[in-house]
Amino acid sequence: MMIGNYYPFRDGRIDEIENGLTESVWVERQLGWPVVKVFNTIIAKALAEAGRPTGSSDRVALTISGDIPRQKKSSLNSLIKSDRFCDAGTIG
């Protein structure tokens, strides 16, 4: 699971990303295995304050993105014990 985003001022400039390669694909190449992004579309304060029970009309949906089968994304969703996630597709 990858929960961060690339920030050149913090991480240093990565030419491949600056030239259009997605950050997640770059990380996959460094690690040598698939990356699944979660929690990177919401700031910590909102994550802490926006939680609502299932069925609430103002409930926030978070994404799980990665080049893995939907079944594995579902397992990841269960692992983090939340049904507030939706499949956002691939990362490429």
Image (cartoon, grey):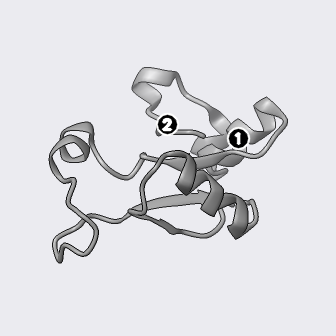
Identify the image quadrant of the N terminus. top right
Up-down: is 11 above or below 17? Answer: above
Name the residue at 75% across, 40% down.
Answer: 28
Q: Position of residue 9 (x, y in %)?
A: 40, 25
Query: Is residue 91 visible to us here?
Result: no
Q: Position of residue 54 (x, y in %)?
A: 28, 68
Query: Residue 1, labelled with which disc?
Result: none
Label 1 residue SS: helix
* Residue count near mark 2 (Cα–Cα under 10 Å), binned few <14, some 14–19, many ≥20: some
Query: Is residue 45 visible to us here?
Result: yes
As rendered, which of 64 and 16 lies closer to the eye?
A: 64
Q: Is residue 20 left or right of residue 55?
A: right
Which amino acid, mark 2? Answer: Tyr
Q: Are marks 2 and 1 in contact (CB under 8 Å)?
A: yes
Up-down: is 10 above or below 66? Answer: above
Name the residue at 55% across, 54% down.
Answer: 78
Q: Is residue 62 left or right of residue 64?
A: left
Label 2 residue SS: loop
Q: Position of residue 21 (x, y in %)?
A: 67, 50
Q: Hey, which residue is sitting farthest right in the picture?
A: 32
As rendered, which of 4 and 46 lies closer to the eye?
A: 46
The residue labelled by disc 2 is 6
Query: Residue 26, labelled with which disc?
Result: 1
- Among the two numbered marks 2 and 1 on one chain, the one whose residue lies closer to the N terminus: 2
Identify the image quadrant of the C terminus. bottom right
Which amino acid, mark 1? Answer: Trp
Q: Position of residue 50 (x, y in %)?
A: 18, 53
